[in-house]
Image (tube, helix red, strand yellow):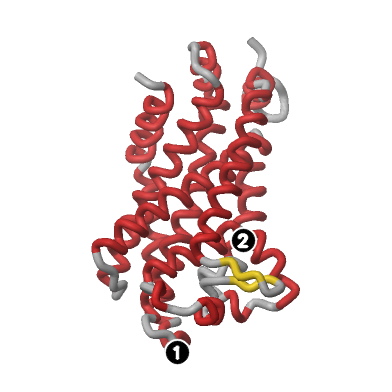
C-alpha cells in the first residue's frame, strides 16, 4: 500500500475511534452555528442573504480549526515511539508529511461537510453546484491549513507547546479574517494583518460561492468584504484562493524541510521524562 494512503487510513480510523474529539468538534460547530444564526442575524439585515453570510463563515472556521488541531496527531506518534517504527521502514519523510497533511485535510473537510448540512437545516440556502464548489474549497483550504498546522507541530515538538503556539496564532487570525467580524469594520491599523492572513481569502471565496456573488461588481464585492482593495489593486475571491494555495505550499515546503531534519531520538527521550527526571532503562 502507498505510504501516504496508509497514513491517511490510519489517522482517519484513529479520529473516528476518538469519540471525544468527534463530539467536541461537532458540538463547537453546532454552538457557533446556533449563536451566529440567531443572535447576530438582526445585525446583518442589510445583506440579501444574511444566513448564508453568517453560516458560511462558521463552516470555514470549523475547517480551519480542525485542520490545525489535527496536526497534533504527529506529536502523539512521536512521543509514543510509533514514528521511529515508521522511519525504520523504507518510507521517505516527505511521504509521511504528505500523509499527515492529507489526513488532516480530509478530516477537516468531512467536519466542514457535516457542519454545512446542519447549516442547511438552519437556513443556509445553496444548490447542488454550490455544495460541490464549497466542498472543493474546503478541501483545498484544509490542505493549506494542515500544512501550517504540521509546521507548527514540527517546530513546537511537544503537545503542550503546540497547543500554546497554535492558540496564540489561531485566535488572532480568526478574528481578523472576516469570518465572525466583517473585514469592513476592522480598524485600519489591523488591515496589514488581514491581508497577510490566508483565512481572510478562504473566507472570501467561501462566501463568494455561498452567496452566489458572481453577479456582483468588483466595487460591491469590496463593500461586502469579499474582495480587497490595496492601494487601488483589488484582490478578487479567486485571486485570494490562489494566494491561499501559495501560502499552503510555502508552509508545506517549510514543514517538510523541518521534518526531514528532526531528530526523533531526542524527542523520544524528552517524552520519556517523568516527574522532572529521565526514565532509566
Residue 120 x %, y %:
28, 68
In depth, the one of 166 and 219 nearer the eye is: 219
Q: Residue at x 54, y 60 (%)?
A: 239
Mark 1 vs mark 2: which is more N-terminal? 1
What residue is disc 1 on?
Answer: 46
* Position above or below: 126 against 184: above
Residue 154 x %, y %:
63, 34
* Position above or below: 158 against 271: below
Disc 1 is placed on an element classified as loop
Determine crowd level at label 1: few under 14, some 14-19, many 20+ residues with C-alpha closer than 10 A: few
Residue 114 falls left or right of residue 35: left
Camera-nearest label, 1 or 2: 1
Which image quarter is the C terminus in?
top right
What residue is disc 2 on?
Answer: 173
> Residue 118 sits in which quadrant?
bottom left
Q: Which mark is residue 190?
A: none
Q: Residue at x 50, y 54 (%)?
A: 65
Looking at the rendered structure, the number of numbered marks drawn on it comes to 2
Which image quarter is the N terminus in?
top left
Residue 272 x %, y %:
63, 23
Determine crowd level at label 2: few under 14, some 14-19, many 20+ residues with C-alpha closer than 10 A: some
Q: Does the rendering let one see residue 18?
A: yes
Residue 214 falls left or right of residue 169: left
Q: Check if mark 1's residue and mark 2's residue have beta carbons within 8 Å.
A: no
Q: Does the rendering let one see residue 159?
A: no
Q: Residue at x 45, y 82 (%)?
A: 40
Residue 78 x %, y %:
56, 26
Disc 2 is placed on an element classified as helix
In depth, the one of 28 and 122 nearer the eye is: 122
Separation of residues labelled 1 and 2 (CA atoms): 26 Å
* Position above or below: 55 against 164: below
Amino acid at each position: 500500500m502507498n505510504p501516504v494512503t496508509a497514513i491517511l487510513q490510519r489517522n482517519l480510523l484513529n479520529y473516528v475511534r476518538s469519540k471525544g474529539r468527534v463530539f467536541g468538534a461537532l458540538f463547537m460547530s453546532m454552538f457557533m452555528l446556533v449563536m451566529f444564526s440567531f443572535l447576530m442575524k438582526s445585525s446583518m439585515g442589510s445583506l440579501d442573504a444574511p444566513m448564508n453570510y453568517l453560516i458560511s463563515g462558521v463552516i470555514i472556521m470549523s475547517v480551519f480549526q480542525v485542520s490545525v488541531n489535527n496536526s497534533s496527531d504527529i506529536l502523539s506518534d512521536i512521543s509514543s515511539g510509533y514514528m521511529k517504527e515508521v522511519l525504520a521502514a523504507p518510507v521517505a519523510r516527505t511521504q509521511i508529511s504528505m500523509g499527515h497533511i492529507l489526513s488532516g485535510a480530509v478530516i477537516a473537510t468531512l467536519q466542514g461537510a457535516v457542519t454545512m448540512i446542519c447549516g442547511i437545516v438552519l437556513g443556509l440556502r445553496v444548490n447542488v453546484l454550490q455544495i460541490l464548489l464549497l466542498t472543493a474549497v474546503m478541501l483545498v483550504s484544509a490542505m493549506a491549513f494542515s500544512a501550517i498546522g504540521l509546521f507548527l507541530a514540527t517546530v513546537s515538538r511537544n503537545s503542550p507547546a503546540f497547543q500554546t503556539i497554535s492558540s496564540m496564532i489561531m485566535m488572532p487570525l480568526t478574528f481578523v479574517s472576516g469570518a465572525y467580524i466583517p473585514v469592513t469594520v476592522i480598524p485600519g491599523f489591523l488591515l496589514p494583518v488581514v491581508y497577510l492572513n490566508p483565512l481572510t481569502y478562504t473566507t472570501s471565496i467561501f462566501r463568494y460561492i455561498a452567496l452566489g456573488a458572481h453577479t456582483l461588481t468588483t466595487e460591491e464585492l469590496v463593500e461586502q468584504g469579499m474582495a480587497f482593495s490595496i492601494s487601488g489593486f483589488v484582490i478578487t475571491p479567486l485571486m485570494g484562493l490562489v494566494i491561499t494555495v501559495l501560502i499552503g505550499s510555502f508552509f508545506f515546503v517549510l514543514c517538510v524541510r523541518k521534518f526531514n531534519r528532526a531528530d526523533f531520538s531526542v524527542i523520544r527521550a524528552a517524552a520519556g521524562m517523568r516527574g522532572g527526571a529521565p526514565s532509566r532503562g
